[in-house]
Image (cartoon, rainbow, N blue to C red):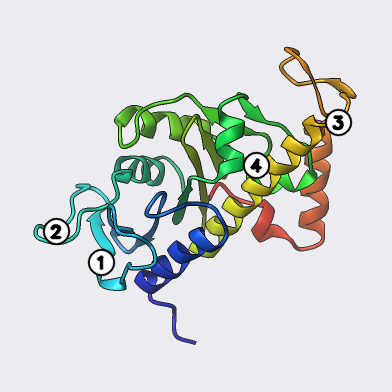
Amino acid sequence: MTEPDPREELVRYGRRLLDDGLAIGSAGNLSVRSGGQILITPSAVPYREMLPAQIVAVGAAAGRAAAGGPEPSSELPMHLAVYAGTSAQAIVHTHSPEVIALSATCDELPAVHYAIAALGGPVRVAPYARFGSAELASAAVAALAGRRAAILANHGAIACGTTLAEAYERALLLEWLARVFRLALAYPAGQAAPSGTRPGPRVLTGAELAEVVAEARRRGYRAAYDGEG
């Protein structure tokens, strides 16, 4: 079977960002490793109009695109930092509303559902830093330690995977979990939140999440629950 063209895949998933409500206009960005290069969506090109030829190839080591072509996404420093610091092969950066709303009020998305184990556990909220900055890149890498997704305060989220499809599914899962958490907050509190700062929904413990991972592995669900990427 012929491998899908990574440029076409980036364009296709870029349009899905709009269809699934994970971004608007040209917000957010996607990338994949391809050999010794990083292929990333261009800056300021609406996803509906984006063409495979506009996908930007950047040297993974040098971090520079070829002269005369489209400009890479302004979040290129964050993508390069994540690739350098993790085993990720693909990255999806969203501006999804549930995640952004959560990031403005919480320091962490707790384990309100066992599916969060597929993201490595409770999802951290990285401190706010300006888009495109080295500070944001560093904050994202730190928040991703031991995780496959992170939330960026007052900004969005980043999800990683061994394939673009896997990273995208994790971005969708993260948005769903953020919505579940918001809905849970509408009900009377059953226990203290992990931080102990205010009442919150009942959440799963680390031991309970470990049990989920062990059972998933026993059933052969390794791709969803294993690995750093």
Residue 187: which disc? 3
The amino acid beneath tag 3 is: Tyr
- Tell me the amino acid under the disc marked 1: Gln
Cα distance in 3D space between marks 2 and 4: 36 Å
Q: Tell me the distance, in whole angstroms, between the alpha carbons under discs 3 and 1.
A: 47 Å
Give the structural element (helix, strand or loop) at label 2: loop
Residue identified by numbered label 4: 120
Q: Residue at x 19, y 47 (%)?
A: 62
| Residue type marked 4 | Gly
The disc placed on residue 66 is: 2
- Binning the other alpha carbons within 10 Å of mark 3 as few (below 14), some (14 to 19) or many (20 upward) gives few
Vertical order, 171 against 195 (above or below):
below
Disc 1 versus disc 4: nearer the observer: 1
Q: Indicate the position of residue 9 as horizontal and vertical percent values.
A: 43, 70
Q: Earlier in the sequence, mark 3 or mark 4?
A: 4
SS for dot 4: loop
Q: Mark 1 or mark 4: which comes first in sequence? A: 1
Closer to the chain start, of discs 2 and 4, is 2
Label 2 sits on what residue type? Ala
> Of the residues tagged 2 and 4, which is closer to the observer?
2
Q: Nearest to the eye among marks 3 and 4: give it.
A: 3
Q: Quick one: SS at disc 1?
A: helix
| Disc on the earlier residue, 3 or 1 | 1
The residue at which mark 1 appears reads as 54
Q: N-terminal of the two: label 2 or label 1?
A: 1
From the top left corner, tell me how far across and down residue 169 is, in percent. Answer: 60, 58
Which mark is in front, 3 or 1? Answer: 3
Q: How many labels were placed on the picture?
A: 4
